Amino acid sequence: MSVGVTGAQRLVLTLVCAVAVATIYAIQPVLEVAGADLGMTSRSSGWLVAAGQIGYLAGLLLLVPLGDLLDRRRLITVHLVLTALGALAMAVAPNGAVAVFGLGFAGVFAVVVQVTVAYVAAVSPVHERGRNIGAVTSGVVVGILGVRIVAGALGDMIDWRAVYIVLAVLCLTLAVVVPRMFSPDTRQRTTRYTEVLGSMGRLVVGDRLFIGRGLISLFLFASFGTLWSGLALPLSSEPWHLSTTEIGLLGIAGLAGALGAARAGSWADAGRAEAVTGWSLAVLVASWLLVAQTGVTLWLVIAGIVLLDFAVQAVHVSSQHILTTAHPDRASSVIGTYMAFYSLGSALGAVTTTWAYATWGWWGSCLLGATYGAAGLAVWAAAHRQPYGPRFESKTPDTSCTPCQRQA
């Protein structure tokens, strides 16, 4: 089903991704004040961050595969409504228990992001697939980084709950717009839900292309999580003593870098996805040399952030292009399983960066982030030394070959 996507449709789907993923990450810049308002201790308030991530992981494994069985347009609409309900529960939560439930509920249905990416991959002609995936996926980075700025500002000017009211309204608005702008998904479906779940397990166990890309994603987002979960620690200390809002403004640098990688999809369409992955991972590793310079000047740190987020987005788009082209008939389950590696990597980075900072300071966290990037580069290099089939670089996939023959 390749009918194409207009510029207006790309914009709407990009907003879907941005708003949905923002419901998970909006708590991070206001965590301290929200936890205190909800009567939670500093230790228990960590569950507010974990709830959304846990819900998201559950949704990736259980709900995203439905996109291979049901009308994806309808799934996007329903998931947006349910994400809005979770955000509203958070906005009116009287205590920590209700807040954790609301964030977990929103996280489960925020996987509308992956259903959206699968929809775009399915309706895009092969020569435009990478470009469209890149454009829509940029919404994820916009949501993750942009909400830090918005939540911090609204928290200072109004109240930390205001951002969840805004997100709920945006989700409901998009739920009205999507069915009006997009055609139903009319694919013929013969596969059962249990068969789709089984195919996800086989991807992890037996598909070497998928395993390689999944491991690259894990290390990629572990490096990403190391930066954004730990950056506030050195910047709120000497010699900077920046406020939460000021630290959140550094998200603009991240946005600039991620949006600068918008052409990664076009590079993938031109058959350069593997090359882009390799040099982008090298840029990721090198960027940590700049990010580590917090004691010298923030301009070097900002330059490092731009490069790091550029590299992360370029690799992320390239990986999704490769996997959805290799498995065009089950894009939802492939992306859902792939994003489980993303979720695990983000959590790994968030947990280990605070430990490294407490033990060795910011240089320790930066060394950790660079190590994660180097591990991803090593996985990519190993795949090149031991290719498992024809190079996966053609613009038009050979639908007669098996998944194992469509390896990179």
Image: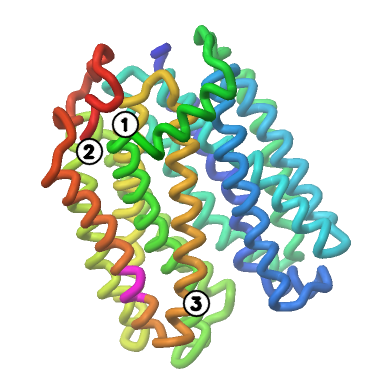
Identify residue for label 1.
130
Residue 126 shows up from this direction: yes
Q: Residue furthest right?
A: 94
Mark 1 in CB contact with mark 2 (< 8 angstroms): yes
Q: Is residue 306 left or right of residue 279?
A: right
From the top left corner, tell me how far across and down residue 155 is, in percent.
Answer: 70, 67
| Residue 354, numbered circle | 3
The earlier-in-sequence mark between 2 and 3 is 2
**Region of the chain picked out in magenta, as a range:** 366-370
Query: Considering the numbered disc 3 on the image, is that residue within a helix, a strand or a loop?
Result: helix
Residue 16 shows up from this direction: no
From the top left corner, tell me how far across and down residue 216 is, in percent.
Answer: 32, 50
From the top left corner, tell me how far across and down residue 190 is, in percent.
Answer: 53, 9
Query: Considering the numbered disc 1 on the image, is that residue within a helix, a strand or a loop?
Result: helix
Instruction: Indicate the amino acid at tag 3.
Output: Thr
Q: In this view, does 331 lie to the left or right of 148?
A: left
Identify residue for label 2.
273
Q: Which of 148 and 312 is in front in this view?
A: 312
Q: Where 192 falls versus 134 (above or below)?
A: above
Distance (Cα) linking label 1 and label 2: 9 Å
Badge 2: few (under 14), some or many (20 or more) residues near its Cα, within 10 Å? Answer: many
Mark 3 in CB contact with mark 1 (< 8 angstroms): no
Q: Is residue 10 left or right of residue 77?
A: left
Instruction: Indicate the amino acid at tag 1.
Output: Gly
Distance (Cα) linking label 2 and label 3: 33 Å
Question: Looking at the rendering, in which quadrant would you find the N terminus?
Answer: top left
